[in-house]
Amino acid sequence: MSTGQTSGQRTAVRAVGPGRVNLMGDHTDTTDGLVLPMAIDLATVVQGRREGDRVVLTSVDDPEVAVVPLDVADPTALTPGWARYVAGVVAELRPTIGFTGTVTTTLPVGAGLSSSAALEVAVALALGFTGTPLALAQLTQRAEHRASGVPCGIMDQLASAAGVRSHALLIDCHDLIVSPIALPSDVEVRVVHSGQARRLSGSAYAERLAAVQAAEAVLGPLRLLADPAAVDRLDDAVLRRRARHVITENGRVRTTATALCAGDVAAAGRAMAASHASLRDDFDVSTPALDRLVERLSATAGVYGARLTGAGFGGCVVALTEPGALKEGWLVRAADGARCVTT
Ligand code: GLA
């Protein structure tokens, strides 16, 4: 694909790809459901010049340099590991001019804050992508599929591309409409690591998606169902739980968006608690470390609610709190989406 690409100039380029945290709606984007993430003020920055016939990126965090030919065929064959995401973008964008530069990040890697999506959107912009935020998200989602083989949804890339300062993003993954939802000014969003690195969950992620698709083959699109009792039509007990999570989670996204709009943070917190229970009991993507952390944070004065965020299987918990209620982890602020400056 070469749409939206500028002709290369030897100008200095600085592209920023924010990470994201998901407030509500996990494992719903892959069946065109609802999600409520926000782009955050932790980000990956790619800077350098458009030149040459390869993409060459160095990272302060890795002695190994990423070298990606413009005609790269198999991103998964590259090292270091993060070079695969760069190569996935190159393979989708097919720029005619290379790039030489550096990658820096303030995002913890593998924590569930979408460090790979942040890298992908920053690389695409650095290489000259100039389409809409949605087109950027679609291109980098395909890049992620190529790089990781995980059939992820569009949430991470779209949150990073389309972020709006001080707002969460209500995304309908069916019609791909993004509605910014103003966050109440008197709440903080904290992200706390469970201490357990997110195990590369590709096969478990794909297995969950296959189960949900098997449920849809019987029930039709889960995004159109509001009553969890619909799952009673499924014979298989595991499929019933998987489908129930998706149906109830879509409902919780609506509830949370409405609650935030009304400034009812307590109601948003209750939905977060219910979401964690559903991810733990029905979708089976939590871990004992995540459960203990959610329990401890939820019992802390001034915490409205806490839940695992992202795919699960380790990684981080997100909490909605009164200002100053938690000191640990990262205080994150809703940030604008990816951007690129050339000088
Ligand atoms: C990962 C995927 C997203 C989404 C979440 C779970 O972050 O990349 O598309 O499915 O897991 O909500």
Image: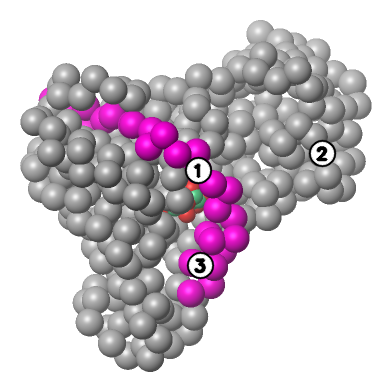
Badge 3 marks a residue whose secondary structure is helix
Above or below, 144 relative to 12: below
Q: Position of residue 57 (x, y in %)?
A: 76, 21
Q: Which mark is residue 209?
A: 3
* Beta carbon at label 3 within 8 Å of ligand 1: no
Query: How far, Cα to Cα, is label 3 from label 1?
Result: 18 Å
* Residue at left offset 40%, top offset 28%: 40
Depth check, front residue: 92 or 209: 209
Amino acid type at circle 2 is Leu
Crowding at label 1, few (<14), some or many (≥20) Cα neighbours within 10 Å?
some
- Name the residue that disc number 2 marks: 78
Residue on which disc 1 sits: 198
Q: Secondary structure at mark 2?
A: loop
Q: Quadrant of the C terminus?
A: top right
Percent x, y of residue 56: 81, 22
Amino acid type, label 1: Arg
Evaluate if marks 2 and 1 touch, with contact meaning CB atoms under 8 Å apart.
Answer: no
